[in-house]
Image: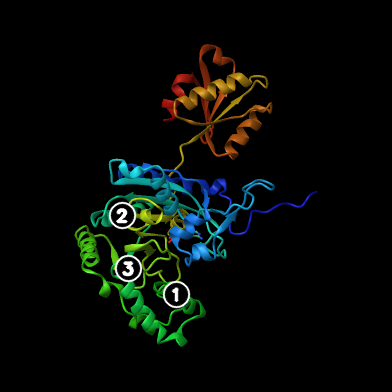
Amino acid sequence: MSRPISAPRGTRDLLPEDGAAWGRVEAIARDLSARYAFERIETPLFERTELFARGLGESSDAVEKEMFRVSGAAGSEEERAEWALRPEPTAGIVRAFVEHGMHVRPGPLRLWMLGPMFRYDRPQAGRFRQFSQWDVEVIGDPGPMVDAELIELGHRFYGEAGLADVVAYVNSIGDGNCRPAYRQKLVDYFGAHEDRLSADSRRRLRVNPLRVLDDKDLDADLAAGAPRSLDNLCDACRAHFDGVRGLLDALKVRYEIDHRLVRGLDYYTRTTFEFFIAGRRGQQQALGGGGRYDGLAELLGGQPTPGIGFGLGIDRTVLATAEQGVAQPAETPLVAVISTDPGALEPRLRVAGALRSAGLRVRADGSARRLGRQLESAVKLGALWAVIVGEELGRGNVILRDLDAHEQRELPLGEVATTIG
Ligand code: AMP
């Protein structure tokens, strides 16, 4: 026997028993996308690495350490092409926005996407190399109303998924006007305490000082004394953030200010936010996060266009619903179509087709086993009903058997769906 091959590290197979929980969460995402008037967009799973380097920033973890590189076929011109699997959706979507000249469309554009992202990170609980995100982007709306709308939408998603106690942590990291001075304040402050910083933070201090605040190992006292971006916003950023907060307060959206929330990517400006289960902040990674990226379109060669979006992790949301014991929806009852006649394959398929047209969930047994055996397997597969196809079909009838009650009767095929109903 040859050696079995296992799935790559950091990936997971979605097995049939997990499908219902995933399907439910994905259905909520699709449904909310429609109710919030978003339009679907799909971008390739891989893009030029330059897109991510320029968009996300060379110093972001996603680009510096976690880029999942892809090469073309051996011997092809593209063999050494610089491509990477997408680590996040926004850069690709804004690339598409610029490439297709979408700024001329009636805006703001409201786009959604649901699919896998890839980061070559160290795998651990809740952190995979391939994971799935529901993503929404609003391009061309300077806010602040849309910022509040997206934070409210995130809450609604977790609420409809059945999660209790989700909090949005919110901050503003300013823009090109006020961030340089704030950045300098951080460099001065942390530079004076460099001996208390981790090696990672000392490096971050040079390339992206805001990300020192992001360091989980940052000394708590040092963090508490650090200059806060909210105290260093220019008037326009301050007014924007006050606007967002005012709306969140008025809508009674559950949020907390987090002065250390900077998000990891360079493209963010002004509002940043992440969703967590309340009280689990320390032990748990974010369920989702997002923010404003008013400079990104221009950075990618387009017209200056404000934008904001979020990516909510499907994997972590499904894990959290399992942890919180959220009930899964009941499946529609399964009907097994079986037959006493080993040769009668076409009638089985025809009857199954008619029942499916009537909306039932049906599997047809194509075996030549004895009827008793077919009934046994139907029960094992979880069927509640069996439809037995025999000579009655000549009269347009079948036998409907209640597999729990062990009762059966003949009835017209057209009445099966209403009888089970
Ligand atoms: P980020 O843009 O890194 O904040 O990611 C947004 C969301 O995607 C996170 O809050 C997670 O729910 C999810 N996510 C990010 N990275 C991973 C990963 N490696 N494994 C599973 N989910 C992830």
One can see residue 401 in this view: yes
Mark 2 against mark 1, which lies toward the viewer?
2
One can see residue 32 in this view: no
Amino acid type, label 1 = Asp
Who's the residue at 64% across and 46% down the image? Answer: 77
- Where on the picture, by quarter, is residue 271? bottom left
Secondary structure of the residue carrying tag 2 is: loop
Q: Nearer the viewer, residue 402 or 221?
A: 221
Mark 2 vs 3, N-terminal side: 3
Give the image location of residue 83, x and y in percent: 56, 53
> Crowding near pointer 1: few (<14 within 10 Å), some, many (20+)?
some
Gap in angstroms between the C-alphas marked 1 and 3:
16 Å
Residue bearing the label numbered 1: 215
Q: Which mark is residue 173?
A: 3
Residue 41 is left or right of residue 76, and the answer is left
Mark 2 vs 1, N-terminal side: 1
Amino acid type, label 3 = Ile
Colour theme: rainbow
Q: Which mark is residue 306?
A: 2
Ligand 1 lies under 8 Å from the Cβ of mark 3:
no
